[in-house]
Image: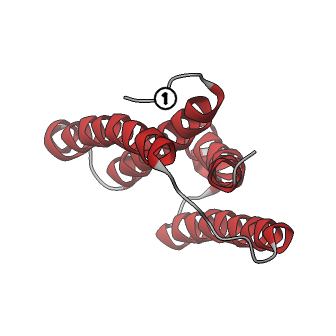
């Protein structure tokens, strides 16, 4: 497994479980956080867990690489470019929905959580497509 593939896998595993828990709490159990401070606290805890898991995982990856340079060739750039383009359209769709459609009927935390959901979805799509790109025989766009 290449170093770039390991980083994509790490990003998925550090991000998806904690944000899934966050959205389950926000959608299924909204009464657990009646105040603004509790909602911000929950978001801060989730973001901190995500960041700590990623940093610890990255340190482990770096330790196993022990001085190996992070080399990126044309295939790596093609895989990343294809994944980033697709994730861009997910993000663009989210921006249109959250910024241009939802404000007419919704406000507050519903907008915030919807925007965060689209950010997480775009990143999940990007990293999933990077992993798929390394596993498929496709060499170019």
Q: Residue at x 85, y 67 (%)?
A: 64
Instruction: Name the residue rendered at 32%, 39% in the picture.
Output: 85
Residue farthest bottom in this picture: 67
User: Of 65 and 14, which appears nearest the observer?
Assistant: 65
- In which quadrant of the rendered view does residue 32 lie? bottom right
Q: Mark 1: which secondary structure?
A: loop
- In this picture, residue 103 sits left or right of residue 82: left
Q: Residue at x 14, y 41 (%)?
A: 100
Left or right of residue 86: residue 57: right
Question: The C terminus is located in which quarter?
Answer: top left
Answer left or right for 132 relative to 1. Answer: left
Q: Image check: 100 left or right of 117?
A: left
Find residue 61 and report its horizontal and vertical position in percent. Answer: 78, 65
Q: Is residue 50 above or below residue 23?
A: below
On the image, the x and y values in percent for residue 132 come to: 59, 29
How many numbered discs? 1
Q: Residue furthest top?
A: 137
Q: Quadrant of residue 83?
A: top left
Depth order, front residue of 7/106: 7
């Amino acid at each position: 497994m290449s170093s770039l593939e390991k980083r994509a896998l790490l990003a998925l595993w550090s991000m998806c479980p904690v944000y899934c828990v966050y959205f389950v709490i926000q959608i299924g159990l909204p009464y657990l956080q009646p105040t603004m401070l509790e909602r911000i606290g929950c978001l801060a805890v989730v973001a901190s867990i995500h960041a700590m898991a990623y940093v610890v995982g990255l340190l482990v990856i770096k330790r196993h690489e022990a001085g190996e340079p992070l080399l990126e060739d044309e295939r790596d750039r093609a895989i990343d470019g294809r994944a980033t383009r697709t994730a861009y359209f997910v993000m663009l769709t989210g921006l249109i929905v959250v910024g241009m459609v939802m404000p007419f009927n919704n406000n507050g935390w519903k907008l915030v959580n919807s925007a965060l959901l689209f950010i997480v979805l775009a990143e999940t799509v990007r990293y999933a497509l990077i992993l798929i790109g390394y596993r498929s025989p496709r060499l170019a766009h």
